[in-house]
Image: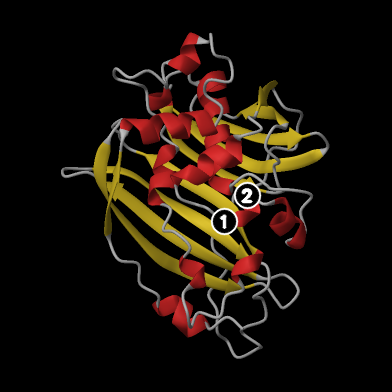
């Protein structure tokens, strides 16, 4: 069983994360850049000279690794899924750099024995002079609810993404995903077999290997940059969403958008009948 006190005391060492131009290009490929190999807007993210960087790569850089497998935490590591992700982007990421990354556990919430537990992780990325991005991940521990057992342990539920407007969407686009998306994204470091091994994915209750939550997050950023930012990634100032169902690599996503103001866009995305991205909320530079 999850040990609330041990999880709350868990400390992430601050780290220096170095990445290269090749890593930046690999991330762009994993989130769909280059699927249209003659599209100049996509190729700008893959060129060797001064490529455009995707702001959502900050979430991939900040990923702290499989911390949930640490001995003594009591977490059922086989039943973890990424529930929500949000980031604020303060400055463009360099195409290659070494950045300082800090992570802390902000909350551990017991949803009940049948509903699992939520862990909120807060992160920040900095270079030598400034903050580049900050954000929060919500991780759903599907097998670890009920640890409080009425004794008062557990934090209040972390802030969740707000619901979408109750009216019809204002616009929609379709965006394909690569059948190799998970195989590409796992080269960024998250090598969980759930994303590449069909038998392990079936054992976890899925029809096959699923895409990483942070790759889906990057695909959402790709869609917003294309649809609302005129292809300019620096105009995406913040992005939050709920990962509401598994996305299988190779599926086509239909994004629906609600324009709430010149600077705020709400969205969701379906793969067939499944809503895989919900309660999306983006801030755009006007």
SS for dot 1:
loop
Instruction: Name the disc covering residue 165, or none.
Output: none
Residue 19 % position (x, y): 31, 41
Residue at label 1? 192
* Residue at the left extreme, as displayed: 129
Q: Is residue 285 visible?
A: no
SS for dot 2:
helix
Q: Are marks 2 and 1 in contact (CB under 8 Å)?
A: yes
Residue at label 2? 195
Image quadrant assignment for residue 51: top left
* Residue at the right extreme, as displayed: 273
Residue 271 % position (x, y): 75, 35
Camera-nearest residue between 177 and 5:
177
Above or below, 63 against 77 in this view is above
Color style of the picture? secondary structure
Residue 267 % position (x, y): 64, 34
């Amino acid at each position: 069983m999850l040990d609330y006190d041990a999880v709350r005391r868990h400390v992430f060492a601050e780290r220096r994360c170095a990445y290269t131009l090749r890593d930046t290009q690999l991330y762009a490929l994993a989130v769909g850049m280059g699927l249209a190999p003659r599209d100049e807007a996509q190729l700008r993210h893959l060129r060797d000279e001064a490529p455009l960087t995707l702001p959502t790569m900050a979430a991939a850089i900040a990923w702290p690794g499989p911390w949930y497998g640490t001995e003594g935490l009591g977490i059922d590591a086989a039943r973890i899924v990424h529930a929500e992700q949000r980031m604020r982007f303060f400055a463009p990421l360099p195409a290659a750099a070494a950045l300082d990354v800090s992570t802390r556990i902000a909350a551990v919430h017991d949803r009940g024995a049948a509903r699992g537990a939520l862990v909120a992780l807060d992160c920040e990325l900095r270079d030598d002079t400034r903050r580049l991005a900050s954000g929060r991940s919500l991780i759903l521990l599907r097998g670890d609810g009920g640890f409080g057992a009425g004794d008062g342990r557990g934090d209040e539920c972390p802030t969740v993404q707000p619901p979408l407007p109750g009216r019809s969407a204002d616009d929609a686009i379709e965006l394909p995903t690569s059948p190799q998306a998970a195989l590409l994204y796992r080269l960024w470091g998250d090598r969980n077999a759930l994303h590449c091994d069909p038998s392990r994915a079936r054992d976890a209750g899925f029809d096959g290997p699923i895409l990483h939550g942070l790759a889906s997050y990057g695909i959402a950023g790709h869609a917003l940059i294309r649809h609302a930012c005129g292809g300019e990634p620096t105009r995406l100032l913040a992005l939050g969403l709920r990962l509401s169902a598994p996305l299988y690599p190779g599926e086509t996503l239909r994004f629906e958008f609600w324009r709430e103001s010149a600077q705020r866009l709400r969205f969701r995305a379906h793969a067939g009948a499944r809503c895989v991205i919900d309660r999306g909320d983006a801030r755009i530079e006007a």
